[in-house]
């Protein structure tokens, strides 16, 4: 495997899962002394320039991570050569990335990193933090495993 220097996390709207993954990934990279370019985006354009949802901001803040300055963007703003890995939160986004023409060797499914194939569920409609706690824990597990594979 060639050296991985950049990771893009992708969900549907880029306001719940992928910004949370970006925040966790940056936090864990800093704590492990990894120098990585980390970003997030969505496959849809529904939330361009919007901040992460309030529950994503709140759960990240609970664990000492600030994602409030992030803004939604669509994955199409990036070319295929910008990131070494493009990590999809679920199978639908994985397939959408391939349909958009992203290099199959770069597109990864987050469920393959310590989650036994599980998708990160979309918590957009959750009314409380419980669902966000669950995805935070899943993301932290997956990203920690991802970083183990990079070392």
Image (cartoon, grey):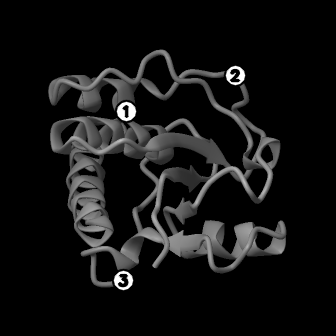
Q: Are marks 1 and 3 in contact (CB under 8 Å)?
A: no
- 128 relative to 96 in the view: left or right: left
Lower position in the chain sequence, tag 1 or tag 3: 1
The location of residue 131, given as percent across then percent down, is 28, 49
Q: Gap in Å between the C-alphas at discs 2 and 1? A: 16 Å
The location of residue 36, given as percent across then percent down, is 42, 44
Q: Are marks 2 and 3 in contact (CB under 8 Å)?
A: no
The location of residue 112, given as percent across then percent down, is 38, 79
Neighbourhood count class around disc 2 (C-alpha, 10 Å): few under 14, some 14–19, many 20 upward: some
- 128 relative to 85 in the view: left or right: left
Lower position in the chain sequence, tag 2 or tag 1: 2
Nearer the camera: disc 2 or disc 1: 2
Q: Gap in Å between the C-alphas at discs 1 and 3? A: 23 Å
Numbered mark located on residue 49 in the image: 2
Q: Secondary structure at mark 3?
A: loop
Can you identify the residue that label 3 sits on?
117
Residue at the image position 48 percent from the left and 53 percent from the top: 5
Q: Secondary structure at mark 1?
A: helix
Neighbourhood count class around disc 1 (C-alpha, 10 Å): few under 14, some 14–19, many 20 upward: many
Residue at the image position 54 percent from the left and 36 percent from the top: 15
Numbered mark located on residue 56 in the image: 1
- 59 relative to 101 in the view: left or right: left
Answer above or below: position of 40 versus 121. Answer: above
Viewer-proximal residue among 105 and 23: 105
């Amino acid at each position: 495997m060639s050296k991985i220097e950049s990771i893009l996390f992708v969900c549907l709207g880029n306001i719940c899962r992928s910004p949370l993954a970006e925040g966790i990934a940056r936090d864990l990279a800093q704590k492990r002394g990894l120098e990585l370019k980390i970003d997030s985006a969505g496959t849809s354009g529904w939330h361009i320039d919007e901040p992460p949802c309030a529950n994503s901001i709140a759960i990240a803040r609970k664990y000492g991570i600030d994602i409030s300055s992030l803004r939604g963007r669509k994955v199409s703003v990036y070319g295929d050569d910008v990131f070494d890995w493009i990590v999809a939160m679920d199978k639908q986004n994985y397939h959408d990335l391939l349909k958009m023409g992203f290099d199959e060797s770069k597109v990864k499914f987050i469920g393959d990193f310590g989650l036994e194939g599980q998708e990160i569920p979309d918590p957009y409609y959750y009314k409380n933090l419980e669902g966000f706690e669950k995805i935070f824990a899943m993301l932290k597990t997956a990203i920690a495993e991802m970083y183990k594979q990079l070392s």
